[in-house]
Image (cartoon, coloured by chain):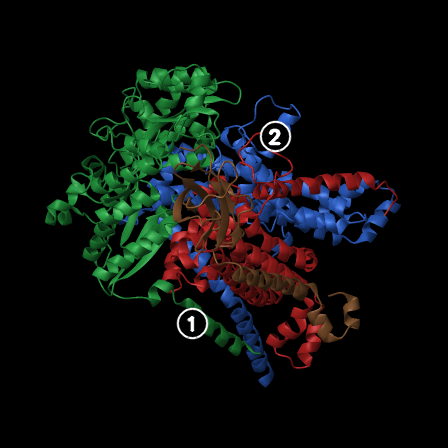
Chain colours: A green, B brown, C blue, D red
Amino acid sequence: MDRRTVLKAGVATAGTLAMPAYLRAQSNKKLSILTWNIADQEALFKEEFADFQKANPGVEIEWLDKKGPDLPAFYQTQLVAGTAPDIVDLQGELWVEWAVGGALLDLTPYLKNEPDLIKLYNPDYMSTLAYDKKNYLLPFYISKTLLYYNKLMFKEAGLSGPPKSFDDIISFSQAMAKGEKTGFITLNFDWLYWPLMKMNGIELLSPDLKKPAFNTPEAVAVLDRLAKATESGAINKIAWTGRWVEPNGAFAGGNVGMLHAHSAAYFFVKGQGRWINQETLGAIQTPGGWSTPTNHGFAISKTSKNPDLAFALIKHMTSIKWATRLAEIRRVLTANIEADKAGLAKVEAEDPLAHAVLQTQLEQTDKLTGNWPLPNDAQVKDAFWPEIQNAVLGRKDAKTALADAERAVARVMRRS
Amino acid sequence: MNDEDISRPKWKRWLLNRFVLVPAALVLITVGWNLWVVTHDHGIVEGRVVDAAGAPVEGAEVRLWVFNFATFVVKASTTTRPDGSFEFADNPSHNIQVSAEKPGTGRSARVPIRLYFASEDFVLKDPLRLTDGS
Amino acid sequence: MRRPHFKLRKSTRKAVLIWSFLAPSLLIFFLYRILPLGWNVLLSFQAWSPMKPAVFIGLENYQEMLFEDEVFWQALWNTIGIIGSAPIGIAIALGLALLVNSDIRGRDIYRTLIFLSYPLMTVAVAIIWRWMFDERVGLINYVARMLDLVDKPIPFLNSFTWALPSVIAANIWQMLGFYMIIILTGLQNIPGNLYEAAAIDGANAFRRFLRITLPLLKPSIFLCFVIGMLNSVTSFDLVYVMTAGGPGHATEILVTYIYKLGFTQTRFDYAAAVTVVFFLLLLGVTFTANRLSGGNAGAVEID
Amino acid sequence: MGKYPRWPIHLALLAASFVMLVPFYWVLKTSISGENIFAYPPSIIPRDPNPFYYVDVWYAIPFARFFLNSVVVSVITIVANVVLNAMAGYSLTQRFLGKSAVLMLFLSCMMIPFQTTIIPAYLITGKLGLLDSYLGLALPMFSTIICIFVFKASFDAIPRSLIDAARIDGLSDWNIIWKVMMPLAKSAMATNVILSFIWSWNNFMWPLIATRSADMQTLPLGLARFLSYQEDSTGALYAFCIMVLAPGILLFLLAQREFVQGLTSGAAKG
């Protein structure tokens, strides 16, 4: 065979292989939706889409799902290429930067047109999805931190009830720690550990969100206590190093007294820990009642060719009917008031413990902390957190760590 | 590749070398396994329900739990025949549990069942035992 | 009269052929290496993000990187540390190669076993080693505690002291087989008569190794070093999965930092500046290594 | 070779092999253990071994589909690599103007880590209209510098006279390569096949960004998905590791002799 035929063959294969799936199915009435690591609900989504297509014939829906750490990378690349999905499921504070950057569509006008719509959703959670009075997301499913505790270990250590204050947390942990056993563990991503600071009256930033405000003697004291407790084994080191699986896994292992985590952790822990039942696991508000939400919401990309349709779809997916289904199947809360009522009712019948956990998510929703409407939240986080790690893991003393953190955060603030 | 290869006829050299034989073996295994699967995936789950004394229980409600995102949810339920036997015909999953309950007689523990492939036909060896009545 | 004319045409035909053979590869490299590099260089002098148009800001990014950004320096030192660890792996590999090269039974089996770790998917390798290093049920800690080497388990990947060495160990483990094969092949290319001659001159094994083996192995060792360095320095998957750069920035290397800057902090412009520096670093290291290994070494020989 | 005791060598090599193999065992053991894998102390021998984690993996993601994708992409990559690298390698054996420049270019290209070029690479692939397609996934790896040098080296090892003879017989360069040189560069080919297979099979970042639809995902993506997911803490993750690694290991074991020969002739010059 000579070069020419080879080239021909090459071109031919190229032709057949080249056409991307989503280009092949190009049509102006097409929606693409990118969800955040919830592939397990494929069946539900298919139903929802089918139902939506009944109401809007001729609409194609492309469903994409990426796992947590990869979603931002994927979405931004798509953004650069101008092929961003019409609808994207965003978590935590990630969306603020993109909203400010003009990647996301302001949904306020839509909500103005349909005044009843916003009444569907829990106002407190709704407020976490707004940036300077503009709504950019509709709540998909929600979750905030609470305190789980291992009643067996509490009994063993002769502790009567759950902790009522930061001091309790520390002293209880000390009481329970020995050998393999540690007293306390927390999730640390997305500011989930922040209630520990907040309950001691520590603020991250000045009220105008311009300057760091956390470098105070109180903060130093708190950080120092956390470091000492970690050193002594009262607080499990994994609290400061683990991501999701390690801390939850450790608590599920039955050797950790308290777990400070969001409600999503419950089912994982339950699945792992054979010891867990109503008598052995307690779930309460964190002392002080402060909690950090990790909410999921649907936003619409500015680049969307048919935003109205996109909005119709997210309205559809967060509607009472489908939010209820999600709440029942995935056993989460959706911030859709009616749906959560129904969901809780169903869960109460099947799994009272889960009900107790989810119930906490609807209480004290006015004391949400750890999410600041900052366009550069991620940069602040990356500047702040490593220094905290340095302190609690005993690499720097609390004072220096906070001073360094202050410098780093100030630098980020100056830049923006 | 080897020198002794050259002595053998060409077709043998092409067919009887590890680059052909190993993949061939793999293909065979795959085909065989799939044949086995398609002939055994009617999703039938059979078993019996007995009371504490070991006597078959009629009309007990048997639940089929199917794994769904970290928890098991009830997929189907049926009631036992006079001889205490029951049968599910539509198990879609590979990771299931069955439990039985009859008011007055008691309830059984949830028996976990792991299958080698989704909706594999399965017969429960020891019956579900209903205990602590009332 | 005609002949020079014909000659010329012949040589041009040859040139055309050569270049048309090179063209596809060159095109690929142009599209996926040169062009992106150019893009990075350009971007490094601008302020840009997927959401705001590019603005020329001169050297600001570089200033921040070099004078303000501690994390950059830490990532840089970690990267250099990993590069520095390559010789360790190579030394071990050299030892193994010498052993495997001896005329013992089952050498092929040993060779295969030792090489087995290289074809593995890095993501999987990272998962495997994360599991080996696990604080509670990792094999290493388990054995260490069985033998009472430690009183309490070492949180390898969660401690500032151990995290980087652990990652490096995993990396060496994966590269070892590859190093060994390269060196082995180098060894087998050393003409045996050299040794005989040396033996006759009464040089003992060690001297023979120093005088003959090492010098002649230079090219292979250089190749090991370059490929090994590139492999480990860009072993994004490994760090990303094993520690994600933590704790603190203890295992942050330039690649992971670049990735984070771009995709989690949306600072592609700044990331581009770091990329440029990274590229220059690699280039510098490679060509010094080339010099050290005697100019035209291995794959790099330029004639 | 002189007479010397063999057993120390065997001992050392056994130790080395052991170190290389233990991680495999540990993961394999975890992947077939029935027990809670976080139980301490971990058992050295798996308790009541069973294959159910593998079943879980199979149903947790569209494994067959991902597998197929990985295979297709790898095959495309391998073919392209062998052809392009052979061509490039051949022309590097010739003397021509600007050769050293080309060599320098290749070498400096090796120094550009792919992770840092994702966005432009993505845009370029988009311009070519190859996003979310097999070809688009394979394209960036169509030619690999190391393999070019392996080919170059093994071509250099071929006696000039042979080629001249062929040329006198009036074979075109194309035919010289395919009919005369390639058969002699079998082992270089094997090396090329294995290396390009390894690289494309293991590639993680690029498919992550360049694939859009779920049914274009490759195995590494499936594996990575496990990391941030429920299965993450069961043995399923490790079962998945084994399932993903098996093909590569098998291929290597099949072709390792040719592979090593390839590198031998390759490393002759580097």
Circle 1 residue: A15
**Closer to us: D152 or A181:** A181
- How far across and how far down the image is residue D196, in percent? 56, 58
Residue B75 visible in the displayed image? yes
Q: What subunit carries mark 2?
A: C
Which residue type does callout 1 highlight? Gly
Task: Tell me the amino acid under the disc marked 2.
Answer: Tyr
Residue at image x 37%, y 61%?
A: D126
Residue A5, percent across and down?
52, 78
Q: Quadrant of residue C6?
A: bottom right
Quarter of the figure that contains the N terminus of chain C? bottom right
Residue at 30% x, 31% y: name it: A292
Instruction: Judge depth for marks 1 and 2 and give the one in front.
Output: 2
Q: Is A167 rendered above or below residue A135?
A: above
Number of marks present in the image shown: 2
The answer to whether the residue labelled 1 contacts the one labelled 2, judged by CB atoms less than 8 Å apart, is no
In terms of image quadrants, where is residue D94?
bottom right
Please give the label number shown on residue C142.
Answer: 2
Front residue of A265/B80: it is B80
Asked if D27 appears above or below D134 in the picture, the reply is: above
Pinpoint residue C171: horizontal percent, then vertical percent. Answer: 57, 41
Whole-percent x, y for residue A351 in the image? 36, 36
Are callouts 1 and 2 both on one chain? no
The furthest residue to the bottom: C2
Subunit of mark 1? A
Taking depth in this image into account, of A344 and D198 the one nearest to the observer is A344
